[in-house]
Image: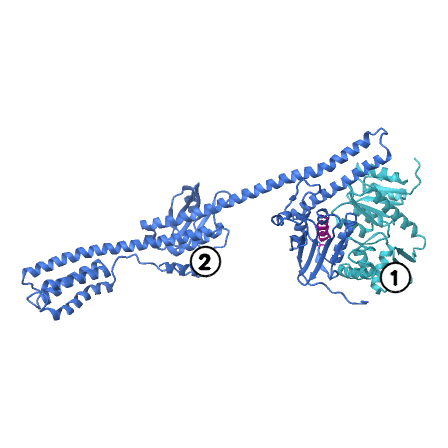
Amino acid sequence: MILCIEQTLLKSTRKTTEKPSDYQHSESPSHGHWLWGIAIPLLLTLIDWPFREILTTSNILMFYLLGVFFVAIRFGFWPSILASLTNAAAFAYFFAPPIFSFAIAEPENLAGLAVTMVVGTVTSKLAENVRHQARVAEQRERRASVLYRLSKELAEARLETEIIEIGVHHLYAEFGGRNTFLFPDRNGLVCYPNEPPLDISLQGADLGMARRVFNHGQMESNSIDTFSNEKALYMPLTGSTGTIGVLVLESVNPRRIFLPEQRQFLGAFINQISHALERASLAEQAKDATLKMQAETLRNSLLSSISHDLRTPLAAIVCAASTLETDRGYLNEDRKRKLASAISEEAQRMSDLTIKILEMARLEAGEVVLNRQWCAPEEVVGSALRRLDKKLKGRQVNVSMPDGQALVYVDAVLLQQVIVNLLDNADKYSPSGLPIDISVETTPFGLSIAVADRGLGIPEDLQEKIFDKFFRIHTESAQSGVGLGLPICRAIVEAHSGEIHTTNRSIGGAVFQLHLPVLEAAPTIDSEEKG
Amino acid sequence: MKTTGPLLLLIEDDPQLRPLLTTALESQDYTVLAVTGGREGLTAARNRQPGLLILDLGLPDIDGQEVIRRLRTWSELPIIVLSARDQENDITQALDNGADDYLTKPFSTAELMSRIKALLRRVAKLPGGGAQECFQVDELKIELTRRRVFVGEQEVHLTPTEFRLLSVLVRNAGFVVTHRQLLEKVWGASYIEHSHYLRIYMGQLRHKIESDPARPHYLLTEAGVGYRLNTGEN
């Protein structure tokens, strides 16, 4: 039977909808069993006949009794009664004098036969009980193993849809009826599921009835719909906090489902599924809560980061400006100029920060539509280097670009931003005398850019985190920045369907490497006058 | 007040920035006429004949782009556009509409002054025949009529298209020329969408002229907007 379930499972995953075979519940013996009830006594008669001179009649009765036991154990109670009767007839006719007559002359034979029949009947009954109990035990074991399989599969399932699919398959395999799970929508009204139905899903369940069952928490049965006579059971799925949904099960064989043992079994099924569903929904809630908490932490770190990073330059500006404002001629020209240049520098710093924050917000809001154009990596790198001309003055920047003129289809302005941010970081976080290496490679598969510095590198456990918003390894370091440079890089690279990561160099320092896939072959031009 | 310089028209709606810019410009001996709206600005441009227009793109009454378009129907008045950042499209559009140069906010007054000076100098040169025969910056020397290009003592051989591209930039030396303008002037109006031509030829040109094409000194990229030939002034 277990084998049969497995087959059904396999088949149902292959989307065939073969009904599982019914297993035997009926206690009534088949024709074959009755036949054995006659055949065994006749066989014993044949065996005993040659020895009728040697054996006493009581010995022969013993042999017959043995036959009855055998029939009782193998073929059940009623065939053994038949065997008893056949024994009596055969004994009276062939062995009890007068032979070849059903009359029995000697009273001891009559008594022996009577005792044999009584003993036969009693032992048959006992054997029958043993058989029944064995069958019940076997059934229980089978059910336990079916439940075990169900619970094992449910335990592995994480998503509600997976749980439902497992539930539908197991219920179908076990109870033979198509079935479906209905859940309440946001308004608390039970409705049809959004997912496409499985082959063995029950369709067209009565929503009104499902809603009633959901509200009252009581099982009901009804015809599946007005067009068919098939009955369906509507059962509430009860979780720890109340009804969480409704199971609708087509009752192919109502007797089978309504037997107390089967009802219990079905109850156990539903319990397991309900608990799994509840567990999944709790896990989902916990995940939501974690996400909310993360968002909250992020908002807090944004606020603290922004307030720190914007207030500092603002303080300098306000201070310098008010000094100039209230000056009554104490400041000489040189002092005044210093104050003015402090204002201008700090304002520039604020402007950079604001631009970064706005850019991140724009990228996050998904407002950025890539303006992809064919352009040469050489040009993008060149314009990035020029933007940082002042900053990188006095630092050696090695550019390795074997195929810098090969066109790539990217948003040049955004890609330039990525390179600027990476170079800016490399400059900030590596000692000023040491070189920065840029290497660009264009292959048929895409564009790879690596920016490497000779700084301290990034601890391995932070190499992923460093791309998170507002994350900084040293939060209160002298380096200005809100921790948005790398998140912006990642957002831009990902908008190009590319990837970016960082590793440490063997000679010390960090490498930031990005790869953008090539989507189209570069266009060609009419080679009018290549010279 | 003693003001001898040319008249500058400033169209800027921001009440903080307008007086600040006016002060800054006046401190450099320019006469400044500051107005808040586009219509007012257009009227002033017609009536007062300014030497240069500084135009903020975000105006309350009519769009800055529209001001440029209308002005260009009857005037060659040089225009510098002021724009908030992150608006490469706006800048490109303004330049394509006929603006001469742009600055993104925030900018330093020094930067604005150098742009104004460069633009006024260019305008001053134009009426004198316009035939600037020879262009030279650092090692690069271009003789337009003889179609010869030198880097140091070495003559560089350019293809006709490369030379056309370079000469368009020379004629606008120091100013941004948009991708669209270059494509139109070098290849023709039907090539405006074929920006890869421009990228490929610009790459070739750089490899012939620049000592390090990855860090160009002469042919500068204005990302997302166009190219600018360095005049060694900025």
Secondary structure at badge 2 equals loop
Mark 2 surroundings within 10 Å by alpha-carbon count, few (fewer than 14), some (14 through 19), many (20 or more) = some
Residue A227 in view (yes/no): no
The residue tagged with tag 1: helix, strand or loop?
strand
Looking at the image, residue A46 lies above or below residue A82? below
For label 2, the residue is A199
- Residue numbers of the magenta segment: A411-424
* Residue A416 highlighted magenta (yes or no): yes
User: Residue lying furthest top in this view?
Assistant: A328
Which residue does the image show at 21% across and 62% down from the upper left? A71
Amino acid at circle 2: Asp
Q: Colour of chain A?
A: blue
Q: Quadrant of residue A114?
A: bottom left
- Position in image of residue A72 (x %, y %): 21, 59
The quarter holding residue A523 reads bottom right
Q: Which quarter of the picture shows residue B45?
A: top right
Amino acid carrying label 1: it is Val
Residue B105 in the image, given as x and y percentages of width and height: 78, 43
Query: What colour has chain B?
Result: cyan
Residue sitting nearer the eye, B93 or A141: A141
Structural distance between the alpha carbons of marks 1 and 2: 77 Å
Identify the residue position indicated by label 1 in the image. B149
Residue A29, visible in the rendered structure: yes
